[in-house]
Amino acid sequence: MTKVIKGGTIVTADRQFTADVLIEGEKIAQIGENLTGDETIDAEGAYVIPGGIDPHTHLEMPFMGTTAAETFTSGTFAAAAGGTTMLVDFCLPGEDGSLLSAIDDWDRKSKDQICTDISYHMAITGWNESIFNEMEQVVNARGINTFKHFMAYKGALMVEDDEMFASFKRCAELGALPLVHAENGDIVQELQQKYLAEGITGPEGHAYSRPPEVEGEAANRAIMIADAAGTPLYIVHVSCEQAHEAIRRARQKGMRVYGEPLIQHLTLDETEYFNKDWQYAARRVMSPPFRSKDHQNSLWNGLAAGSLQVVATDHAAFTDKQKQMGLDNFCMIPNGTGGLEERMAMLWTTGVETGRLTPEEFVAVTSTNIAKILNIYPMKGALVPGADADVVVWDPTISKTVAVSTQKSIIDYNVFEGMQVTTQPRYTLSRGDVVWAYGQNSQPQPGRGKFVRRPAFASASKALSKWKALNTPRKIDRNPMNIPAGV
Ligand code: URP
Ligand code: ZN
Ligand code: ZN
Ligand code: ZN
């Protein structure tokens, strides 16, 4: 059974050209002119791009006394409807602290539920010998090559610097990539208490208590700790110039540091928290909070310049009712917003349509760069023979208004509600299956998605440890008799 995507303009991270895509089973078989197959998928007048990869989601995650309401089924369906064919979810250790049982737990939740492919990042939320030992199996037996560290959420998920340093060194040994949520959790906690004591209990207090300085400090600290540990580093949800500046500077000095802005931070700003409607503002509470326009511009510039490499959503979606846990205290509002379905169209509309990004850069930051950084390229993130047939027919003639009434997400609101987007997937293909066709009431089969194993890295960590070897300390042998008298 073969399919041909016909008549579209192929856009890769490097170039645009007119060609057809021949798909055999789950894989791309050929790219060329005048191809034929058993079935034809019309791409006339549209772009043909690699399926989007969202490197940062929290589906059904227990967090802040509740559980994120978006399920693996609704989340992956929403993703497909928006042109995203793979997402990477965060796996959190439970009560017993075991990494391997956390993965089993996530497998139980996602298996038979996912409509498109997924992978996991593993969170390190403490440090001991069994975590040290389990990390090897996480990488080599379970195919997870990334470990996330929370520098915020003190008293819950936060790790201390010594724990982070130990884990980073372990990552370097295993050929894994550490990730950090960069916010200084100690300062956040103190500021939260300060604003509550001043009687600021609403969502604006969330923004006040997490200023850009706490993110910049943590980003700088994590970068230095990664450098000392001899490992590359990936900073999630970079929201401000201070963190971006730290990444730029590190990269200029030859460190391998990656930065991930979110579509929310690129398009929504801090004024959202000052809305008179409590529920409106609470829906937008996430960490780090939305920033001013200056910070947004910094992120856009970083994507264009390459100092920031990917765009994610951090999709952590809580219902209105769940958000109301923090009615009297902003610290109790579950942190997180959605965007899985809107990421691609919002980024095209606000990035490509405005001339801030080229279509090729759009493909790079939504798919190709992510696949490379996460070590699954060119199986994912590429339109080449042999790659998985995760392909989107991206139609610039379909515009739509984002509305909760038409979204696939099961959350009762949408932070992009009312915004006009200028592109939509005409078709989304996941490993050769059409999982979304615009206007055709698609319902992809839960359980058809697969877990994608991501092997340990060879190249980047080796390059860094070789560089580190140049700085290997030498012990200086001194004859104590040579100490000058009188010293
Ligand atoms: O506010 C957010 N981002 N919630 C999800 C958990 C995290 O910090 O990534
Ligand atoms: Zn501390
Ligand atoms: Zn985070
Ligand atoms: Zn997150």
Image (cartoon, rainbow, N blue to C red):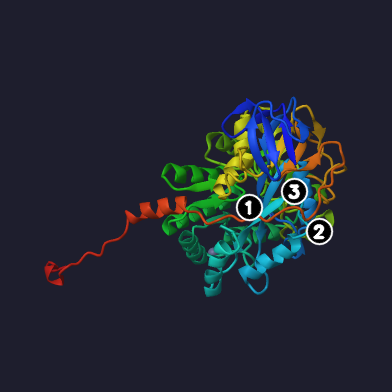
The alpha-carbon separation of the residues under discs 3 and 2 comes to 14 Å
Image quarter (top left, top right, bottom left or bottom right) of the N terminus: top right
Q: Mark 1 is on which residue type?
A: Arg
Question: 10 Å neighbourhood of mark 2: few (<14), some, or many (≥20)?
Answer: some
Secondary structure beneath dot 2 equals: helix
Q: Distance between the residues labelled 2 and 1?
A: 21 Å
Circle on res. 210: 1
Q: In which quarter of the image is ligand 3?
A: bottom right
Q: Residue 338 carries which label?
A: 3
Whichever of labels 2 and 1 marks the residue nearer the N terminus, that label is 1
Residue 220 image point, x, y percent: 49, 51
Residue at horizontal 84 percent and vertical 57 percent from the top: 321
Q: Which of 449 and 261 is in front in this view?
A: 449
Q: Provide the secondary structure element on which disc 1 rests.
A: loop
The residue identified by callout 2 is 322
Q: In which quarter of the image is the C terminus?
A: bottom left
Residue drawn at x 37%, y 51% as measured from the top left: 467
Comes first in the chain, label 3 or label 2: 2
Q: Which of 360 and 262 is in front in this view?
A: 360
